[in-house]
Image: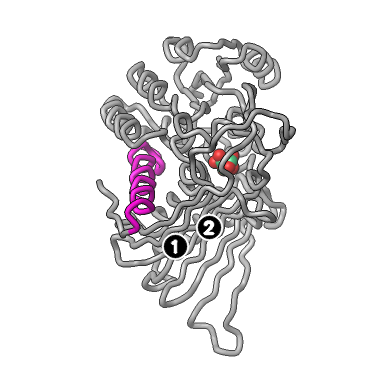
Amino acid sequence: MRKLNVGLIGAGFMGKAHVIGYSNMPKLFWPAPAMPILKKVCDIVPEIAEEAKERFGFEQCCTDWKEVVNDPTIDVVSICTPNDSHAEIAIAALEAGKHIICEKPIAATLEDAERMEATAVKAAENGIISMNAYQYRRVPALVLAKKFIDEGSLGELLNIRCTYLQSWSADPNSPLSWRFQKKIAGAGTLGDIASHVIDIAQYLGGDIDEVVSMMKTYIKERPVQEGGVDLLGTVKLGSDAKRQAVDVDDEDTFLVKFKNGTVGSIEATRNAWGRNNYITVEVHGTEGTVFFNYERLNELQVCWAKDPDDRRGFKTIYTGPAHFYGEATWNIPGMNIGYGELKTIEMYDFIKAIATGEQPSTNFKVGCRVEKVCHAVEKSSETNKWEKVID
Ligand code: SOE
């Protein structure tokens, strides 16, 4: 079986998620499309790099990402660093002939995203694969929703309503990590989580054409976190900690019009007490409705218009071996998958793309389109008008 040497850059939260994906992929999907070998891990903090090597089972570690990208033995690069470094690393890796999977959002600026897309298109001519880590569209229940849409079971699409609500930044003492700094993250909630539901909305409904939006920053300053990994609000800093201004959005609410005439809405915030990873997707069509909530990620609710009046209502389909990515979903519906299996499904699609030479559904062109929608959302929040997504 073909072996692919993996270089991982950024060994924090998402680095761990990629490692789980690589390691578990051949265990859930067999025969695997190719065998990932954990070769080299990189983190700018030497202790984190050393720990990642030992803990995750990499053969080598380093603190300079260029050592990964320039290593001729590396075939595949995972980019799990903060957003402002994606472009430089991804472009160098693509030019060095490495296949890459890059965390979302694709970049901190639209200019960088466009440069990444252009480099990926060129690299694709030589069979190089590029992928953005928009894993949620791969949840089996959402792939099932997409099947119902594509086969026409929902009829004509009327409305796609999506939310992504979390609570980890609702506490004003949650530290000012890189996610609250525009120069590193590019945007706040918009790039961090609204981007996921923009991707899902476009996956289900096609390209978004226009948006009208409101963006708000509720917590104007936060205590500064000095170095270390981003702990996503699990650590609160004391009231004596130095505070610094937040220059990104906490909440984004926008209406969307799709190119095909469907309308919809997207709401995202990391300040919603009681909501954890509350990604909801509701699609209304002339023949029925589907509803999905990530906090119940193994379920898809469906309601068919054609059912008799006295029994029409939502029924719940538990995804399992009969559905998409059934190999990853254990043998019995209700045994359930979680975030780890989802990242494993994502790695399966990535490694399969390398093995077949076919670009994955979340390639850099798709990642860049999400960025273009984000750009229109930002513009509309300033102009208070409908803004076109510019291709
Ligand atoms: C924090 O909001 C975060 O880790 C995002 O960055 C991820 O993309 C999301 O999947 C989970 O929450």
The residue that label 1 is drawn on is 265
- Quadrant location of residue 155? bottom left
- Residue at 29 percent across and 51 percent down: it is 389
User: Would you call the spot at circle 2 few (<14 residues within 10 Å), some (14-19), or many (20 or more)?
Assistant: many
Residue 26, x across and y down, in percent: 59, 32
Helix or strand or loop: what does disc 1 sit on? strand
Q: CA distance from mark 1 to mark 2?
A: 8 Å
- Residue at 48 percent across and 14 percent down: it is 68
Ligand 1's quadrant: top right
- Left or right of 128 in this view: 138: right
Above or below residue 291? Residue 332 is above
Q: How is the image coloured?
A: one colour
Residue 131, x across and y down, in percent: 42, 35
The amino acid on which the numbered mark 2 sits, given as a three-letter code, is: Thr
Above or below residue 4? Residue 292 is below
Q: Nearer the viewer, residue 28 or 336?
A: 336
Q: Nearer the viewer, residue 365 or 304?
A: 365
Residue 13 among those drawn in magenta: no
Return the disc, 1 or 2, that comes first in the chain's sequence.
Answer: 2
Ligand 1 contact, mark 1 (Cβ < 8 Å): no
Residue 148, x across and y down, in percent: 46, 65
- Left or right of 369 in this view: 281: right
Helix or strand or loop: what does disc 2 sit on? strand
Ligand 1 contact, mark 2 (Cβ < 8 Å): no
Residue 162, x across and y down, in percent: 50, 59
Q: Give the numbered dot on residue 163.
A: 2
- Residue at 56 percent across and 59 percent down: it is 280
Magenta-drawn segment: 358-384
